[in-house]
Image (cartoon, rainbow, N blue to C red):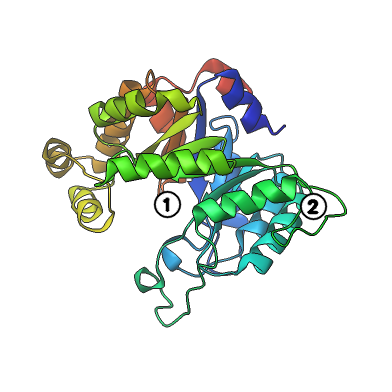
Amino acid sequence: MSRLSELLESGKFSVTAEINPPKGVGVEDILSKADTLLGSVDAINLTDQQGAVMGMSPIALASLLLQRNVEVILQVTCRDRNRIAIQGDLLGASALGVENILCMTGDPVGTGDHPDAKMVFDLDSIGLIGAASSLMRGKDMGNNSLQESPKFYIGAVVNPAASELADEIIRMEDKIEAGARFFQTQAIFDPTQLEEFMAIVRHTGVPILAGIIILKSGNMARNLNLRLPGVHVPDAIIDEMDNAGDKASKGIEIAGRIIRDVMGLCSGIHVMAIGWERRIPSVLKAAGVLSSERDSSS
């Protein structure tokens, strides 16, 4: 079992964060950020061409981080590869030591820096979860036997603020049936909304990590409302950011407050710092999550 699976399955409140692989081959800054997070987070997501913006393969970066004893979660999207390539990448990742994967459909290319690229979407996220589960059972999607099977702790995403929440919950249940064992949510700014969602899905019994975005400004919050489906930053929070003299400190304070409010509702948090990864320890301290035990493990 991966360390992340042991933590989540034991019921320990867990913290994950995410890092975008670089647009190029220079990895020094990414490795430095990961070192900063050691002892503060339990695992680091490596995004897979997030926002359809081309960057280094997350599999390569995962290998480098595993060599530094960093627990990684490999994001895998369906947009860019057919089922043959995806299964091959999953096997390769497993051979390199990757155990945690997060299965996602992927953003459309129109949002990224290669708008003329062709989208594949041979699989959707449920199909991808099923493919990973099949590989674990020793069979590929063509029902061909493997020489040796990978072992994955499979994650998926869910949006507690989806406009069609009933459909979102059905898809969540389908993902669990396909093999998902933990979930990360879209960014949460209204803890009451998460509380209502958790009351509906608690019967599933799967660990759920609440997504947390560190705000940098009021304009960033407004852009999230405009461009990120299922995310709503309340006007009161936007006003706080607009009126703050030190916007970085205010963003850290707000993120810490949201974390404190959701801690009793979910199995952990997933922090999306969007370039502010070095500020994550400060957010966790503001939330009271960065315990002496985590500090001493760094």
Is 21 situated left or right of 236 in this image? right
* Label at residue 95: 2
Which quadrant is the C terminus positioned in? Answer: top right
Instruction: Identify whether 9 is placed above or below 181.
Output: above
The x and y percentages for residue 37 are 55, 37
Three-letter amino acid code of the residue under disc 2: Ala
Q: From this viewpoint, is residue 259 visible?
A: no
Q: Residue at x 12, y 40 (%)?
A: 235
**Which x, y percent locates residue 6?**
65, 25
Instruction: Pick whichever, 219 or 150, lies toward us.
Output: 150
Neighbor class of circle 1 (other Cα within 10 Å; few <14, some 14-19, many 20+) is few
Q: Is residue 231 left or right of residue 244?
A: right
User: In the rendered structure, are the residues bearing label 1 and label 2 in contact, judged by CB atoms less than 8 Å apart?
Assistant: no
Instruction: Measure how far apart labels 1 and 2 are at the Cα level.
Output: 30 Å
Q: Residue at x 71, y 45 (%)?
A: 66
Q: Secondary structure at mark 2?
A: helix
Amino acid type shown at disc 1: Gly
Image disc number at residue 275: 1
- Residue 36 lies, in percent from the top left, at 56, 39
Residue 249 seen anywhere in this rendered image of the structure? yes
Say if 12 sits above or below 219 in the image: above
Q: Within the image, what quadrant is residue 110 found in?
A: bottom left
